[in-house]
Amino acid sequence: MRARQLQLKPLCEACEKRGLIRSARVADHIEPHRDNEAKFWNGALQSLCTPCHSGDKQAFEKTGRMPTRIGPDGWPIE
């Protein structure tokens, strides 16, 4: 599943939304499977780089919101 997902979409989808180009390394379950086998095997996947998966995605799952990013001008990025 991972190999197929990364073959179809080799770039990090979260980074692409921010205008960045970064190779994806993780096939992430869009909806957390929480040990549900049906969701694990049949759930939709997205390609993410390791920092997006380990940082932003996990923070979102814990708090329900994405971390605020600050741009080079010092203002928050949506």
Image: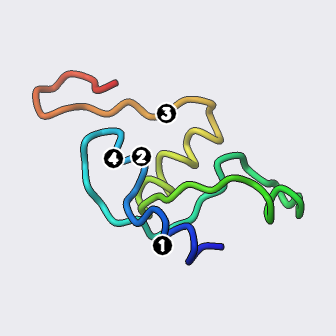
Vertical order, 22 against 16 (above or below): below
In percent of width and height, residue 65 lies at 55, 29
Q: Give residue 16's mark.
A: 4
Residue occupied by mark 1: 7
Q: Say what secondary structure mark 4 lies in.
A: helix
Q: Nearer the viewer, mark 2 or mark 3?
A: 2
What type is the residue that disc 4 sits on?
Glu
Query: Few, some or many C-alpha atoms within 10 Å of disc 2 (few <14, some 14-19, many ≥20)?
Result: many
With 24 as the anchor, is 20 left or right in this view? left
Q: Which residue is mark 3?
A: 66
Indicate left or right for 63 with 71 as reference.
right
- Quadrant of the frame with the N terminus: bottom right
- Tell me the element at label 3: loop
Q: CA distance from mark 1 to mark 3?
A: 27 Å
Circle nearer the N terminus (2, 3)? 2
Q: How far across and how far down the image is residue 12, in percent?
A: 40, 56
Mark 2–mark 3 distance (CA, rounded to whole Å): 11 Å
Identity, as a three-letter code, of the amino acid under mark 1: Gln
Label located before the other in sequence (2 or 1): 1
| Depicted 1 relative to depicted 30: above or below | below
Residue 43 at x, y = what percent?
Answer: 75, 54
Who's the residue at 60% across and 73% down the image? 2
- Which disc, if any, is residue 14? 2
Residue for point 55% across, 54% down: 46
Q: Is residue 11 above or below residue 2?
A: above
* Displayed quadrant of residue 4: bottom right
